[in-house]
Image (cartoon, rainbow, N blue to C red):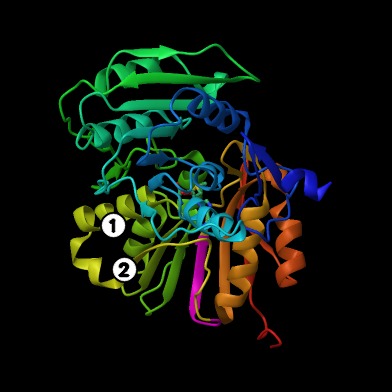
Amino acid sequence: MIQELTQAVLGNKTFTLERFPLEQKTRSLQAWDSADEYLINYVEEHHSELNNIAILNDSFGALSCYFNDKANTLISDSFIAHQAAKYNIEKNNLTSANLDLLSCFDLPSSEIDLVLIKIPKNNGLLAHQLAKLSQVLKPGTLVIGAGKTKDIHNSTSKAFEKYIGEAKTSLAVKKSRLVFAKFEKQAQDTPATIKWELKNTDFTINNHANVFSRDSLDIGARFFMNFLPQTKKVKSIVDLGCGNGVIGLTTLTKCPNSEITFVDESDMAVNSAGLNIQQNLPEKLDQCTFMQNDCMTGFDAESQDIILCNPPFHQQQAVTDHIAWQMFIDARRVLKVGGELRIIGNRHLDYHGKLERIFGNCKLLGSNSRFVVLSSTKEKALQS
Ligand code: SAM
C-alpha cells in the first residue's frame, strides 16, 4: 500500500516520491497528481527538444525530479515544497546542484526556454507569478500551465492573456487540463498587495497574493483577538502560522515589551507580516523576527513563553490536521516550563482532545457557535 503511494511512474521514468513533511500522520495521499502526468506526457511528446526549464508550484518535487536534467529554476511560495523537492531529488539519486530554488519575489537569473506552471487555486498568486515571468521571458517562450479542471476557469485564461499571450486550453484528461501561451507581452508589474483596515484600530493590513484570508480578516482570527495575552512584562512570543501577522500585530499592542517571532511556511505570509509591522508599528520592528519555516523546526527547546496559533487545516487541496498536530508537538518542546500554547479552532476539529493528549491539560478560554479558544500549559520539562 505505502509503495503504491510513493512509486510514481511518470512518462518513461519511475521515482520514489514522498509527500512532506515526512512525519505527517496522513500518508494516504500521493506526492504527484494527474496534472503532473499530463504535463510530463505533453512535454515529452511535443517539446522534448527544449532545455532550460523553469518550474513553478511543484508541490512535492515530481516535476523537478522528472525534468532534473533540464530544469534550472524552481519557484514556489512554500517552504515545504522547496524542502520536499530537495528531499525527493536526492532520494532518487538526482542532483539539485543546478536548480535555483526561488521565492515568488525572486526573478530567475538563468536563461528560460520553457515554463511549466502548476496552476495555483489562488488566481492572485497566478497573476503575481505570470507578471514576474513577464519581466524575464524572451518573446516566443512557451508557458504551459497544468491543473485540475475544477481549478482552471475563465479567469485563468484571462491571467495568461494579460501577462503572457493568447491562451489555449487542452481537452481534459483524468480531470486535468493544460493551458498554453507563448510570451508576446511587455514586462508588467505584479498586482499591488490587497489592503484593508483592521476594525477598531488605526492599522491597515497588507496582503501579498498568497496570504491566507487576504481579502478580509479571518473570522477565527477576529474571535481569537478577544483572547490574546496582555502584559507589560518582557515575554518571548511566537505567532505560529502568522499569515499576514494580524495576531502578532495585535498582541504587540497588548504586550508592548514582548519579542515576537512571526513564523509561516509561506514566504508571502512572512513578507506580509513584516510589511504590516513596518507600516503599523514601526517602533516595534526591532522586537520582531520574521521566519519562513515548517512549524517550529530548529527552535531551541524551552525558549519561548507563549505560542499563539490559528492552525491551518489543509495542505495543498487536502483537508488534514497533521500540521496542527505538528505545531502542538513543536509547541510543547519549544515552550519554557510554565509557558503557554493558546489556540483558536473550529469546534468540530477536537483540538481539545489533541491538546489534552500532548500537554496533559487544556483550558477553554472562550467559545462561540463556531470556535473555541484553548490554552495548554507546559507543566514540566520533557525527558531528554
Ligand atoms: N495567523 C493568521 C490568521 O489568524 O489570520 C493565519 C492563520 S491560517 C489559519 C494558518 C497559517 O498557517 C497560514 O498562513 C499557513 O500558510 C500557515 N502554515 C501552514 N502550514 C504551515 C507549516 N507547516 N508551518 C508554518 N506555517 C504553516
Vertical side of 261 occupied by 59: above or below = above
Q: Can residue 369 be seen?
A: no
Check residue 305 for magenta coloring.
yes
Please name the amino acid that badge 1 sits on.
Gly
Label 1 residue SS: helix
Q: Does the beta carbon at disc 2 come under 8 Å from ligand 1?
A: no
Q: Which mark is residue 274?
A: 1
Please name the amino acid that badge 2 sits on.
Cys
Residue 234: horizontal and vertical position, in percent?
37, 80
Residue 353: horizontal and vertical position, in percent?
76, 58
Residue 179: horizontal and vertical position, in percent?
43, 19
Q: Residue at x 19, y 36 (%)?
A: 135
Q: Which mark is residue 288?
A: 2
Q: Which residues are magenta?
A: 301-308
Residue 38: horizontal and vertical position, in percent?
57, 26
Q: Residue at x 46, y 32 (%)?
A: 120
| Distance between mark 2 and mark 1 Cα atoms | 8 Å
